[in-house]
């Protein structure tokens, strides 16, 4: 471990959270003659946790300690042609449309624009499961899914 890495790790330990815990593990393991079991006892962690972060740091360096967003399941691709898009936009904007039809249209348009379920749910203030349901229904039955259930 270089002096630069050691200094960065000491800086990370001043913070709170998982990254600080990982930095403490790596620094404790850097001392020669200290076993993983001893480090785990000193830090109040499992031996497997100490071994994991020691190995990960040795393999990937400082980048291994940072949190990365989880990728999640891939979302189902949803496309609409120009005519369908125009119809959905009209339903979403029209004041005389049933509110449920307008909301479903907005959900499908968001899915077609490539947004993920969480983002659409936040924008429209609905539950992510609602977005997931309408994404899958639209993929399986097409345009009819939106308009038939609104009638």
Image (cartoon, rainbow, N blue to C red):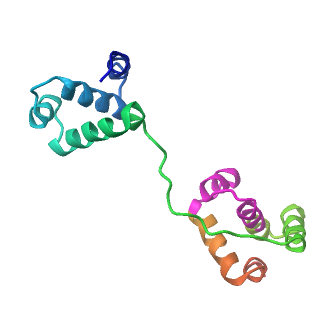
Quick one: 146 or 15, which is closer to the camera?
A: 15
Quick one: 117 or 12, which is closer to the camera?
A: 12
Quick one: 71 or 127, which is closer to the camera?
A: 71
Horizontally, is 97 left or right of 104 in the view?
right
> Considering only vertical position in the picture, is 129 above or below 9?
below
Kindly indicate the quadrant of the structure image that contains residue 59: top left
Q: Is residue 142 magenta?
A: no
For the point 31% across and 41% down, the residue is 56
Q: Is residue 118 magenta?
A: yes
The magenta stretch spans which residues?
105-128
Horizontally, is 94 left or right of 101 in the view?
right
Kindly indicate the quadrant of the structure image that contains residue 145: bottom right
Quick one: 136 or 3, which is closer to the camera?
A: 3
For the point 59% across and 65% down, the residue is 75
* Quadrant where the image shows the C terminus: bottom right
Find residue 103 and report its horizontal and vertical position in percent: 75, 64
* Quadrant where the image shows the N terminus: top left
Find residue 121 and report its horizontal and vertical position in percent: 64, 56
Horizontally, is 136 left or right of 17 in the view?
right
Find residue 100 and report its horizontal and vertical position in percent: 74, 69
For the point 10% across and 37% down, the residue is 37
């Amino acid at each position: 471990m270089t002096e630069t890495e050691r200094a960065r790790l000491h800086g990370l330990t001043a913070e709170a959270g998982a990254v600080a815990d990982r930095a403490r593990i790596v620094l404790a393991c850097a001392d020669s003659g200290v076993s993983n079991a001893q480090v785990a006892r000193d830090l109040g962690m499992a031996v497997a946790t100490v071994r994991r972060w020691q190995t990960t740091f040795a393999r990937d360096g400082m980048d291994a300690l940072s949190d990365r967003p989880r990728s999640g399941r891939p979302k189902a691709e949803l496309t609409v042609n120009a005519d369908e898009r125009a119809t959905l936009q009209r339903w979403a904007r029209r004041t005389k449309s049933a509110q449920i039809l307008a909301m479903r249209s907005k959900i499908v348009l968001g899915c077609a624009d490539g947004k993920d379920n969480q983002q659409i749910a936040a924008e429209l203030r609905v539950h992510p499961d609602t977005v997931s349901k309408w994404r899958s229904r639209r993929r399986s039955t097409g345009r009819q899914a939106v308009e038939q259930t609104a009638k």
